[in-house]
Amino acid sequence: MKKLFAAISILCATYALQASTDYYVMFSVFSPGQIPVAKSSIDGVCLNLLYGEVQNINGLSFGIGGSRVREHMNGLQLNGGNVVGSAMAGAQLGFVNLVESDMAGFQFSLWNDVSAYGDGFQLGVCNTVSDFEGFQLGFVNIANKMTGCQLGLFNWESIASESTASSDIFSGLQLGLINWADRINGVQVGLLNFIDDNGLYFFPFVNGRF
């Protein structure tokens, strides 16, 4: 996990620092009303009043509106809505956080989503991820594949419909009111516990498979 976190961090920083156009500060009212333009890469601070957009950032993005990084982000996004178009290493804090590729770090919002691989911690009302290693804490937690812990009212591990790999499984602990897993190597603790690929499909309070 630590090696992967370091690798994604280095990757994000490399893209941000090697971009063709670099600036230290970006200020935006509502993109394209911003200085410098959205295709710029920032090694420093982005200030977003309503909405700002940059190509890459290595540093801090801050504002009351929305922030979109088209490619790589290494640092902190602190806005109403945060979007990273590729890989992110660091943290996102806002009402909605979206990473459209890999994430290593922390997300805190009403809805957190990682489209590819996530390594770290999601804290929100609803947390969704494709492949995750770490901890999800929220009212609703959803993962296609996960190693770690889900803590919430409804925890769901749902293997992607096109997947046939035996490694696509939930490994760890589901703790909640309702726990549901397609395949699991671990324990469910809750009022209602379901495991699709199990001789004991349903069992109250405690269920599991190893």
Image (cartoon, helix red, strand yellow):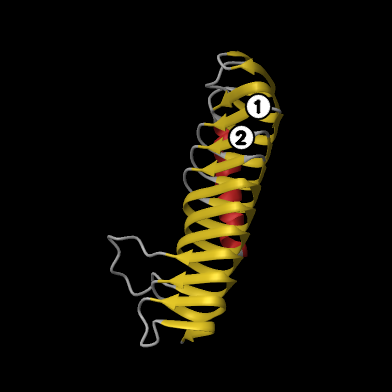
Question: In the depicted view, which residue is nearer to us: 63 or 3?
Answer: 63
- What residue does disc 2 label? 81
Taking the image as shown, residue 49 lies to the left or right of residue 128, namely right
Question: Residue 11's x, y, as percent?
Answer: 55, 46
| Residue 153 quadrant | bottom right
Location of the N terminus by quadrant is bottom right
Label 1: how many Cα within 10 Å (few below 14, some 14–19, many 20+): many
Q: Amino acid at mark 2?
A: Gly
Number of on-image labels: 2
Q: Secondary structure at mark 2?
A: strand
Label 2: how many Cα within 10 Å (few below 14, some 14–19, many 20+): many
Tell me the number on the disc at residue 46: none
Q: Measuring 54% from the left and 38% from the top, which residue is drawn there? A: 84
Question: Residue 114's x, y, as percent?
Answer: 51, 50
- Counting residues from the start of the chain, the first of labels 2 and 1 encountered is 1
Question: Residue 112's x, y, as percent?
Answer: 57, 48
Taking the image as shown, residue 41 lies to the left or right of residue 196, namely right
Q: Measuring 55% from the left and 36% from the top, which residue is drawn there? A: 83
Q: Measuring 61% from the left and 16% from the top, which residue is drawn there? A: 30
Q: Amino acid at mark 1?
A: Gly
The vertical placement of 69 against 167, above or below, is: above
Question: In the depicted view, which residue is nearer to us: 200 or 23?
Answer: 200
Q: Measuring 66% from the left and 33% from the top, which residue is drawn there? A: 80
- What residue does disc 1 label? 65
The vertical placement of 61 against 110, above or below, is: above
Taking the image as shown, residue 117 lies to the left or right of residue 124, namely left
Question: Residue 151's x, y, as percent?
Answer: 62, 67
Q: CA distance from mark 2 to mark 1?
A: 6 Å
Task: Please report contact status of discs 2 and 1: CB closer than 8 Å, yes or no.
Answer: yes
Question: In the depicted view, which residue is nearer to us: 73 or 200?
Answer: 200
Q: Secondary structure at mark 1?
A: loop
